[in-house]
Image (spheres, rainbow, N blue to C red):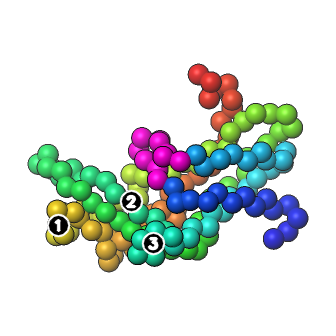
Amino acid sequence: MDSDDLETLFTGPFTVDLMGDISEQEFGTVRLAPGTYTKIEMELTDVLTGGFSVLITGTYHDDTGGETSFSYSYANTEDFKFEDPEGVVISEGEEDTLELVFNVHDWFAAVDFASITPTEGVLIITGDDADSVEAAIEDAGEFFLVSEQMNDD
């Protein structure tokens, strides 16, 4: 780590409804020093039951209007990176918010839900489908600044 790196620890686990933008726990906040930020790294740990770092549950809606619960477990503890070569600029005295945005729809776009046989009424995403979700999670995110004025509206 070089002297320009800022390291902050947020201790979870955290339960987050990504579609509803709701978290059961507060993540906390960090004041960033003025400067240009081109990369955000997150390290996941395997603290969930079964040695997983992420557990995603949801509902699959088929073409006939039927609904089936699904589950996907992610056991990757490598760094998760958001990168933007141009970066975002934090100015002195500004009260902007740096937001991380995940495109959750893209995570499951390649999953063939119709081919998964339910286990106790739940579609468990495994194999090639799980690999496609993992790759999409690692690729489908960005970060940007939101001004405090926009947050107050």
Q: CA distance from mark 2 to mark 3?
A: 11 Å
Label 3, secondary structure: give it.
Answer: loop
Residue 7 visible from this viewpoint: yes
Mark 2 or mark 1: name the one nearer the start of the chain.
2
Between 130 and 63, the residue placed more toward the observer is 130
Q: Which residue is mark 1?
A: 120
Residue 103 visible from this viewpoint: no
Residue 130's tag is none
| Place of residue 112 in the rendered image (x, y in percent of width and height, measured from the top left) | 25, 65
Quadrant hosting residue 94? top right
78 with respect to 145 (left or right): left
Looking at the picture, does residue 95 appear above or below residue 62? above
Seen at 65% across and 36% down, the residue is 146
| Place of residue 93 in the rendered image (x, y in percent of width and height, measured from the top left) | 85, 34
Mark 3 or mark 1: name the one nearer the start of the chain.
3
Q: Which residues are magenta?
A: 15-25
Residue 56's tag is 2
Labelled pair 2, 3 in contact (Cβ < 8 Å)? no
| Place of residue 45 in the rendered image (x, y in percent of width and height, measured from the top left) | 56, 70
Labelled pair 3, 1 in contact (Cβ < 8 Å)? no
| Place of residue 131 in the rendered image (x, y in percent of width and height, measured from the top left) | 39, 73
Q: Which residue is mark 3?
A: 52
